């Protein structure tokens, strides 16, 4: 479990332990990959890239262990399209053919792609023309500030090279509460589509996202996880714009998780203690400079 989330979400860890799991904070000393990170930075908050390295190393060193990645890889995006397939049918049942705007949070890309890919199929068939908008955290802006290049999917370089939008596999995002979005890269399929201009991307700081989350909770009665608050912030922003212009618009997003294990984050926000991290370009440049050299 990524160190930042291990510290921020203790009850998620406790739930896993209740069911018999042994949970390590990543980077850990249980693997060589984790130990190497700790040797360089004993206070590392960890990242999804580091956790992937540790998981791959642990699985590769044990004959009875298997590892399945839950995001980023293209086949995972295909599995997640059950979300969008259901949404297409729900729109038809409601008498709507297509939304005007589809907005989703992006870390590795599976939730976002799972929502919009079935609608993109309809769009390419001439059945509508929705705007598709990816929303990523300002702390890990691989679309909006990364580069399109071959890179490793993990920090230690165990994975094959993937051509994707990346901040560099050495990049460690600041410990924002949206732990599921703290990834240095983006799905190869989504990265290619972004290069083709098939959707747009924006980045949001966490305080704006939590403001949207509180507004959503008070109107809908559901406390969102930090990850989908990014999409909610962009959806609310668009709805306010429509209120000002008078333009009617149907906006679709997906609430991909509840925030019941994230109440410490909500407490910080409500007490005015949450901070937005500034990401200097120098940190991105330093990580990008370490991208693997691929012969042309």
Image: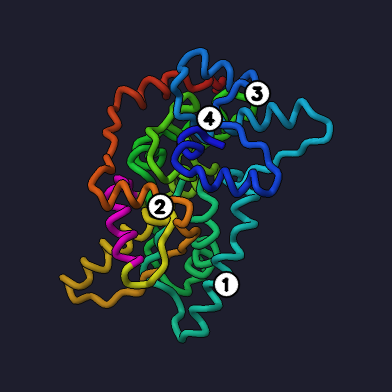
Rounded to the nearest angstrom, the CA distance separating label 1 from label 3 is: 41 Å
Which label sits in the foreground, 2 or 3?
Answer: 2
Rounded to the nearest angstrom, the CA distance separating label 4 from label 2 is: 38 Å
Q: What residue is shown at x 47% (from left), y 24% (from top)? A: 170
In the picture of the structure, the residue carrying the numbered disc 4 is: 150
In the picture of the structure, the residue carrying the numbered disc 3 is: 30
- The dot on residue 263 is 2
Residue 256: x and y in percent read 50, 59
Which label sits in the foreground, 4 or 3?
Answer: 3
Label 2: few (<14), some (14–19) or many (≥20) C-alpha neighbours in 10 Å:
some
Residue 198 visible in image: no
Question: Between residues 109 and 26, which one lies in front from this camera angle?
Answer: 26
Q: Earlier in the sequence, mark 4 or mark 2?
A: 4
Visual colour scheme: rainbow
Rounded to the nearest angstrom, the CA distance separating label 1 from label 4 is: 34 Å
Q: Is residue 70 left or right of residue 164?
A: right
Residue found at the very far right of the displayed protein: 63
Q: Earlier in the sequence, mark 4 or mark 3?
A: 3
Q: Is residue 89 left or right of residue 22?
A: left
Q: Earlier in the sequence, mark 2 or mark 3?
A: 3
Helix, strand or loop at mark 4:
strand
Q: Earlier in the sequence, mark 1 or mark 2?
A: 1
């Amino acid at each position: 479990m990524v160190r930042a989330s291990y510290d921020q979400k203790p009850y998620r860890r406790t739930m896993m332990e209740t069911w018999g799991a042994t949970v390590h904070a990543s980077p850990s000393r249980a693997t060589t990959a984790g130990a190497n990170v700790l040797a360089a930075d004993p206070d590392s908050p960890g990242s999804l890239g580091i956790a992937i390295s540790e998981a791959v190393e642990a699985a590769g060193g044990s004959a009875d262990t298997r590892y399945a990645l839950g995001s980023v890889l293209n086949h995972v995006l295909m599995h997640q399209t059950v979300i969008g397939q259901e949404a297409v049918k729900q729109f038809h049942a409601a008498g709507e053919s297509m939304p005007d705007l589809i907005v989703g949070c992006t870390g590795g890309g599976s939730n976002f792609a799972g929502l919009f890919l079935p609608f993109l199929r309809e769009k390419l068939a001439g059945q509508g023309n929705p705007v598709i908008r990816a929303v990523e955290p300002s702390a890990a802006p691989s679309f909006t500030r990364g580069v399109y290049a071959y890179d490793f999917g993990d920090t230690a370089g165990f994975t094959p090279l993937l051509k994707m939008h990346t901040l560099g596999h050495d990049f460690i995002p600041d410990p924002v509460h949206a732990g599921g979005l703290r990834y240095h890269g983006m799905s190869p399929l989504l990265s290619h589509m972004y290069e083709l201009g098939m959707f747009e991307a924006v980045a949001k700081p966490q305080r704006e996202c939590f403001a949207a989350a509180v507004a959503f909770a008070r109107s809908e009665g559901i406390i969102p996880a930090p990850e989908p608050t990014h999409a909610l912030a962009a959806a609310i922003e668009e709805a306010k714009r429509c209120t000002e212009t008078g333009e009617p618009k149907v906006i679709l997003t997906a609430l991909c998780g509840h925030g019941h294990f994230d109440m410490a984050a909500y407490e910080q926000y409500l007490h005015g203690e949450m901070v937005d991290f500034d990401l200097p370009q120098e940190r991105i440049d330093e990580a990008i400079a370490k991208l693997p050299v691929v012969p042309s």
